[in-house]
Amino acid sequence: MSETRNQPLTFAVPKGRILDEALPLMARAGIVPEAGFHDKKNRSLSFACEDTSIRIIRVRAFDVATFVAHGAAQAGIVGSDVIEEFDYPDLYAPVDLGIGHCRLSIAEPKDGVAEEQRGTSHMRVATKYPNITRRWFEARGVQAECVKLNGAMELAPSLGLAGRIVDLVSTGTTLRENGLVETARLVDVSARLIVNRAAFKTDATRLGPLVEKFRALSTATAEAA
Ligand SMILES: Nc1ncnc2c1ncn2[C@@H]1O[C@H](COP(=O)(O)OP(=O)(O)OP(=O)(O)O)[C@@H](O)[C@H]1O
Ligand SMILES: O=P(O)(O)OC[C@H]1O[C@H](OP(=O)(O)OP(=O)(O)O)[C@H](O)[C@@H]1O
């Protein structure tokens, strides 16, 4: 995508839970959305910023990666879970922002996996992350048949959809309240700054300093911790 200096730089953020932690960091990096961004009734998806050379789009977490990978947004913030799931070659993730910490884990019913689901060389897993899941099991010589769900994975074992699930875990409350236990941790997750690789080259005068600002902020946060 060619340089579009006269157009605002588009910064994609997820609608979900990373946003509350991301907004203060973004503000310190000079990205402050217009007041309407915080109005829950506002149905706009694109927002001007105090710095008029930037605009924010608010999309679903998985779509942040897609918009940035295709150059429709030049930069954004997304969980490392999403980056690993897509593995887009055009995504550059230069900064771990140190927010949105959780893990991607396997869980199964606390009373054990149902007889008909108890495969050892082949098993059925419900997940929003079929690529990460398949890769992880493959590396252990197990063929995982993934049933793709977009939420409420925790229901799958009790309803016989799959023996196990692979989902994000933070406090463990959701698993516990649905009668599941964590049996293995696939990967630790945190939110990253992402940049479109081509834009990073063609629009280096804007994206270079932006990356450096977030890098300095995350280093300062890590040192203070
Ligand atoms: N329990 C959690 N604790 C900490 N971080 C989490 C947790 N769950 C998810 N995340 C992080 O937040 C990101 C967004 O999660 P969330 O499901 O809230 O997004 P979303 O934009 O509402 O997505 P969607 O609407 O597509 O489900 C995840 O990709 C992950 O990196
Ligand atoms: O270990 P815990 O602290 O309970 O967090 C884990 C839950 O958080 C995420 O869901 P989220 O609340 O984002 O809702 P979702 O099902 O819409 O993705 C994840 O999918 C788990 O369900």
Image (tube, rainbow, N blue to C red):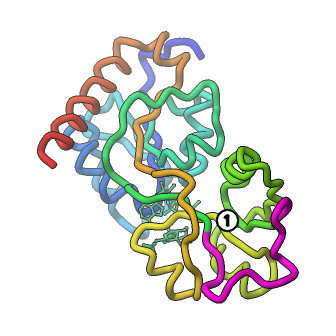
Binning the other alpha carbons within 10 Å of mark 1 as few (below 14), some (14 to 19) or many (20 upward) gives: few
Picture coordinates of residue 163 (x, y %)?
76, 75
Q: Residue at x 52, y 51 (%)?
A: 187
State left or right for residue 60 relative to residue 224: right
State left or right for residue 160 relative to residue 31: right
Q: Amino acid at mark 1?
A: Asn
The quarter in which the N terminus is drawn is: top right
93 is higher (above) or lower (below) than 17: above
Picture coordinates of residue 224 (x, y %)?
12, 45
> Looking at this view, is 214 or 160 the one in front?
160
Identify the secondary structure beneath mark 1. Answer: loop
The magenta region covers 107-123
Q: Residue at x 71, y 44 (%)?
A: 139
> Looking at this view, is 126 or 196 the one in front?
126
147 is higher (above) or lower (below) than 135: below
The quarter holding residue 118 reads bottom right
Q: Residue at x 73, y 54 (%)?
A: 130
In the rendered image, which residue does mark 1 sit on?
150
Picture coordinates of residue 133 (x, y %)?
69, 53
Q: Residue at x 66, y 73 (%)?
A: 153
